[in-house]
Image: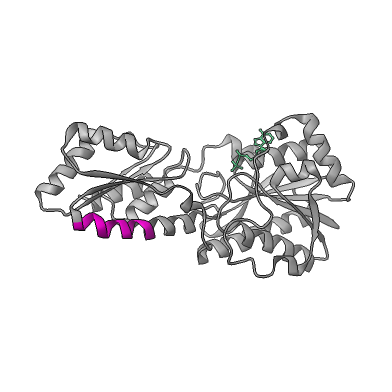
């Protein structure tokens, strides 16, 4: 293996730069040339590809976002379009491609490895949603979690001054992990996630009981994949007369300097991706399980339903918020 390329695709997440840096440095350490593809699969099609040097990734480990930029490229689902991308890699003699992104990005990489046997592809899980099978954690999840905690701690100050109920809508797409982890970490009264059916009447009763007991405020953490914060507020006020305010944290959750945990994860996974390319592996997503580096085929990642929701911790959160 003499030349590889790296790209970031789909929704960005804090720590993507640290992952690119690890890929670039580990490859150069192993005498492999590295090319950066700008704007994800769109850049592969547009031939927006540039050789990266050791210095190209200097001063990036602490930066949020991705210096290679990210883009959505719907036409990449078409085989003829992908041929153009493959050609742009082949003409440079690139034999390996590291794709940092979510499961949509993995599908693009899987297609490339199916359609061109000379190009090995490895996926690195980069998304705040923590929704990729084969890895306990994805790059960006921990930073987003800490951003939410920071925001809710501030909201809590004003919530208690005015004895209000705050409904916080957080990201995560169809995965409730961000809402669960953030909800438990901020001591939310209720956590609403797509994985668990919730009766809003019960939520209203819990808030009401709290107010009767003299609680100054309540925090309800809602995962966007379950319902919007606004809908949650509307439903709640059907049952109780409560001063409910909604905060939709939005894209603030995707930004910021990556946490220590995300820098570590990104560095380890990026380095592991290069190791797998050197071993001749392809169509594999790297991950971490019980703090051990793992490799899972794309096929298995798409087939299994393994990234299971942590119902035990969800139950604990309920027990701690009585
Ligand atoms: P994420 O990687 O965060 O899940 P998307 O689902 O938007 O984000 O996917 C990112 C990009 O991956 C898409 O814009 C497209 O270029 C590519 N992609 C997604 N699904 C496929 C697919 N089935 N086949 C080929 N490429 C795909």
Residue 197 in the image: above or below residue 109 = above
Residue 217 in the image: above or below residue 27 = above
Color scheme of the displayed model: one colour
What residue is at 78 percent from the left and 33 percent from the top?
81
What residue is at 83 percent from the left and 50 percent from the top?
95
- Verify whether residue 160 appears in magenta: yes
Specify the segment rendered in magenta. 150-161
- Say which quarter of the image contains residue 103: top right
Residue 197 in the image: above or below residue 267 = above
Image coordinates for residue 171, horizontal then vertical, percent = 45, 45
Q: Main secondary structure of the magenta part?
A: helix
Quarter of the image containing the N terminus? bottom right
Is residue 36 left or right of 11 when viewed as pictured?
A: right
Of 171 and 243, which appears nearest the observer?
243
Image coordinates for residue 22, horizontal then vertical, percent = 68, 63
- Verify whether residue 200 appears in magenta: no
Is residue 199 left or right of 77 when viewed as pictured?
A: left
């Amino acid at each position: 293996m003499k030349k590889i390329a790296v790209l970031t695709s789909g929704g960005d997440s804090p720590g993507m730069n640290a992952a690119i840096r690890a890929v670039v440095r580990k490859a150069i350490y192993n005498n492999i040339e590295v090319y950066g593809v700008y704007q994800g699969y769109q850049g592969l099609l547009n031939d927006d590809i540039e050789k990266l040097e050791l210095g190209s990734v200097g001063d990036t480990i602490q930066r949020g976002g991705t210096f290679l930029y990210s883009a959505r490229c719907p036409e990449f689902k078409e085989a003829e379009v992908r041929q153009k991308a493959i050609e742009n890699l082949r003409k440079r003699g690139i034999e390996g491609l590291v794709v940092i992104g979510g499961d949509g990005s993995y599908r693009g990489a899987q297609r490339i490895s199916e359609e061109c046997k000379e190009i090995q592809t490895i996926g690195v899980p980069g998304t705040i949603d923590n929704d990729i099978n084969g890895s306990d954690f994805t790059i960006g999840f921990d930073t987003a979690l800490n951003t939410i905690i920071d925001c809710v701690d501030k909201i809590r100050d004003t919530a208690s001054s005015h004895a209000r109920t705050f409904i916080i809508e957080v990201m995560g797409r169809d995965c409730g992990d961000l809402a669960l982890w953030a909800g438990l970490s901020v001591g939310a009264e209720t956590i609403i996630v797509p994985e668990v059916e919730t009766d809003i009447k019960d939520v209203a009763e819990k808030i009401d009981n709290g107010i009767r007991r003299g609680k100054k405020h309540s925090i309800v953490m809602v995962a966007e994949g379950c319902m919007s914060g606004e809908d949650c507020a509307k439903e709640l006020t059907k049952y109780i007369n409560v001063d409910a305010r909604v905060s939709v944290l939005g894209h603030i959750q995707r930004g910021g300097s990556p946490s220590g945990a995300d820098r570590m994860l990104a560095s380890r996974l990026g380095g592991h991706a290069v190791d797998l390319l050197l071993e001749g592996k392809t169509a594999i997503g790297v991950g971490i399980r019980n703090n051990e580096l793992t490799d899972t085929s794309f096929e298995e990642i798409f087939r299994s339903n393994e990234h299971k929701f942590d119902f035990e911790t969800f139950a604990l959160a309920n027990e701690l918020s009585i």
